[in-house]
Amino acid sequence: MPCRTGRARPRANVGNPTGGSYRPVVSSPHIKSAAVTAALVALDEGRTPERPVLRDAVRTLLATLAERAPGRSVEVRVPPYGAVQCIPGPRHTRGTPPNVVEMSPEVWLALASGRLEWGTAITEGRVRVSGTRADLSAHLPLELG
């Protein structure tokens, strides 16, 4: 269907005149930082973090990665809690992305916090990657301060 106004707008910006993200802020950064800390403490103690804490920690760190490495050429997936597109380069718009990084929530927390190195995670098969751009080594660990 042709655009009646003469200029097309990307779907993500419909109803958002600023052109920023269309996703709402779920909770404050202070709560998210507490979730990351609580999840890491639980893992360090050999416990499994509570599901809501683990979810919030994973989403916080994914959002931090997307903020610090803006772009849409790589999709980072941490099922079942979240996925983000990041890293500058050719933009992916639909279907299965050509550059995908996927891992468990525990591995994501370890990588993002610097408790696990990217190369070690790849070598041990703890991270699944596909595509020529699916390398997060330049962006990890995230500075959590």
Image (spheres, helix red, strand yellow):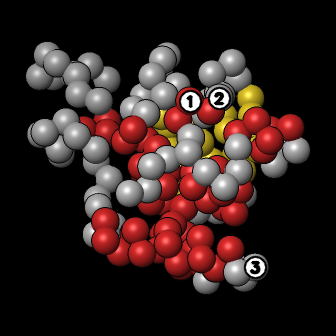
Q: Residue at x 31, y 65 (%)?
A: 29
- Badge 2 density bin: few <14, some 14–19, many ≥20, Cα 10 Å: some
| Amino acid beneath label 2 | Asp
Residue 102: horizontal and vertical position, in percent? 70, 45
Closer to the observer: label 3 or label 2? 3
Tally the marks.
3
Instruction: Look at 28% across and 44% down and name the residue there.
Output: 21
Q: Residue at x 48, y 17 (%)?
A: 89
Q: Which mark is residue 135?
A: 2
Quadrant showing the C terminus: bottom left
- Quadrant in the picture for residue 75: top right
Q: Residue at x 45, y 49 (%)?
A: 143
> Dot 3 corresponds to which residue?
46
Q: Which labelled disc corresponds to residue 138?
A: 1
For the N terminus, the quadrant is: top left
Q: Is residue 112 left or right of residue 88?
A: right
Image position, residue 114 (x, y; %)? 61, 51
